[in-house]
Image (tube, rainbow, N blue to C red):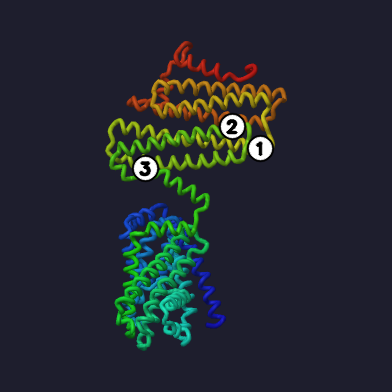
Amino acid sequence: MDFFDLLTMVGGLALFLYGMHLLSEGLEKLSGGRLERVLENLTNNRIKAVLLGAGVTAVIQSSSATTVMVVGFVNSGIMKLSQAIGIIMGANVGTTITSWLLSLTGIESDNFLLQLVKPTSFSPVLAVIGVIFILKNGKKRDLGSILVGFAILMTGMDTMSSAMKPLSQVPWFTGLFTMFTNPVLGLLVGALLTAVIQSSSASVGILQALCATGSISYAAAVPIILGQNIGTCVTAMMSGVGASKNARRASIVHLLFNVIGTAIFLIVFYVLHAFVDFAFMENAADSAGIALVHTGFNVVATLILLPFADYLEKLSFILIRRDDEEERQAMESELFAKMDERFLNTPSFALEQAYSYTLKMAELTSESLGKATYNLFDYDKKTAAEVEQMENLVDRYDDEISGYLVKLASRNLSEQDSRKLNMLQHSVGDLERIADHAMNLVDCARAMNKKEQSFSDKATEELKVFSQAVRDIVSASVAVFESGDEAAARLIEPFEETIDILQKEMKKRHMKRLRKGKCTAEMGFVLSDITNNFERIADHCSNLAINVMQLGEDDTHAHEYVDSIEKGEGSEFDRAMQEHLRRYELPGKAAK
């Protein structure tokens, strides 16, 4: 191997990594949730996943290619790490078909079909099709990126292997296969040489070819075969370079599977050999025997480690730890575990789960608003960040609950459960919008802090009273939603009317201060933005109360209920509103 072979190998590595990036990016854009569902159906059972991995690898005759594609799926978020483990194990089993074919046909086969299914044979065709799709610049552009990415990736793999291929003809290189009699040294040599060639199939093939000379015994061949399974992991490890943490964990699982499997096989095999004395170990190895050992190891390792797949996943998380963002996402995933799709077969119970999550969403929304309003008067960067995190979590609640309710709606529900489901569907939307308005208030506070602006003392006093009223109506609405008390729900509408009156009074007072030069127009826009958010929050609180009342009435609609309310002087509505106005009376004289 000269300098130019080294340059070729480096160029092949560059193509490999770029192809991996292009493949992952294309898969992510094209999938749109469809590919995730297909793979989930194929891999929701570990045994099915192993069979899928074995089948794909048997067809393309490259465990490295299968594992790299799996790493790409995990990197793009299309496949979960837990789903990938079974396919990775299956890939190790599927790759053994190559050694059986080589034992029959030799390292280089002239069989047209055998050559056609090799990735290096069909990837140029995929590249041509992919380029055509990309140049058309239509809906198939992302599919074109996937095909071209796969072709570039395979070209990079083939380029690296070709650059190293001359070593297989160098006597000192092939002599390394036979010079070590110690099993551990033999294992290391097999791992090292396969890592250099980047193909366990090619490495096993070379070993099979050397067996034709009759100079290699099973005692030398067995540890080398075990090492070759470890060495092939280097391709998957390289595919994880620059990828997401989960993608790197997938490549780590591949390495762990082979290292642990090798350790178990090596210990058990040589302990038994010490007691039983396998006579065949001193015999000259042949191609079929090499294929048998290769297959036996991978099948046994898969059978032993498949029940412990979850522990392999946990070990990969120990080796590659979560960062804060990933930890938060994991906690959120665990948070929604009780909305299990299996509960959909018992609709009433599933509905209760959704209701309990909506209550948590309501409490979180109320808390975020409290922090947001206090932040208006005493801006704190940490508190602002907390409100933003809460708003993101409320959005997640909205997505999870809404999606669950849509699935539940197709089930056979009682009339009462159907009303409750409709109530929850409307309520999660109102709660999500309240959290959005809370975030808007934080944006107002952040902007004022950045510009070093503040309201006048009188405006601040008025705003504190107004914000307290808004916090109270949200708390009251959440309490109504939790209790389902219709009588209490009817008192929310006069509270909402009070908020409208307070907003109008705030605007009048601001205009009075503006005419007297006690306030600026710019701060007036900020004040208007804040009070508008307050008023809209109250509207959503009114909607929450009406949603609760709809549980007990067949055809109650929001606008119909509001229009039917008796608001005359002395009415129940008027008395409640007057009580709220006295409680939240703005300081100072009213504007005229």
Residue 219 shows in this picture: yes
Instruction: State left or right for residue 281 relative to residue 559.
Output: left
**Pointer 3: what residue?**
339
Neighbour tally class for label 2: few under 14, some 14-19, many 20 plus, Cα within 10 Å: some
Neighbour tally class for label 3: few under 14, some 14-19, many 20 plus, Cα within 10 Å: many
Residue 148 shows in this picture: no
Picture layout, residue 531 above or below residue 114: above
Name the residue type under label 3. Answer: Met
Name the residue type under label 1. Answer: Asn
Of the image marks 1 and 3, the number of the one nearer the N terminus: 3
Residue beneath the point at 44% across and 78% down: 185
Residue beneath the point at 40% across and 40% down: 401
**Pointer 1: what residue?**
449
Name the residue type under label 2. Answer: Tyr
Residue beneath the point at 68% across and 23% down: 513
Single out the residue that lies furthest toward the top. Answer: 570
- The image's mark for residue 32 is none
Q: Dividing the image into 4 quarters, which one contains the C terminus?
A: top right
Q: Position of residue 98 (x, y in %)?
A: 34, 75
Instruction: State left or right for residue 96 relative to residue 360.
Output: left
